[in-house]
Image (spheres, rainbow, N blue to C red):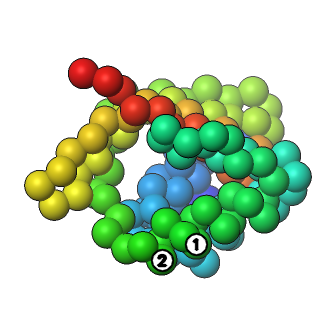
Amino acid sequence: MGAVTTELTDEAVLAANAAFYQALEGGDLAAMDALWAEGDDAVCIHPGRTPLCGWDDVHRSWAAIFGAGGNPQIILTEERVTRRGGVGWVSATENMLSGANTAVATAINVFEHDGQRWRMIVHHASPILR
């Protein structure tokens, strides 16, 4: 998996971000689980939803989403990475395609390096109203 690295570089944060979207598009719960930090400080805010706090709630949400099927293709634009030591974040626009339906959201994904790999600690996506 692209997120497995000891490197503290912008490129490594971007690789972890790409692994997140690959797991999301593929409905791959095992890959999603491997990417996230499993602590109480994990936070996930799906578009239009209230925050899910703690790994157990975050995991259950991904399991439900993947169980429903129909995961969209996501094309990222305006991707920007920032890193401060062992913490990095990526802001981007998510252009989602699912059959004939499209949607656009803005997202921020925060990763923390645990000494072996970059782990996601926050995903926040909000719809862009047009």
Image position of 39 with respect to 125: above or below? below
Q: Which mark is residue 63?
A: 1
Q: Which residue bears the numbered disc 2?
A: 67
- Label 1 residue SS: helix
Residue 5: image location, x then y, percent: 68, 59
Question: How many numbered badges does the structure rendering display?
Answer: 2
Residue visible at 22% across and 52% down in the picture: 97
Residue visible at 58% across and 72% down in the picture: 63
Q: Amino acid at mark 2?
A: Gly
- Label 2 residue SS: helix
Residue 109: image location, x then y, percent: 59, 40
Inter-mark Cα distance, 2 to 1: 6 Å
Query: Image quarter for residue 35?
Result: bottom right
Residue visible at 31% across and 59% down in the picture: 72
Residue 93: image location, x then y, percent: 38, 32
Q: Is residue 21 left or right of residue 53?
A: left
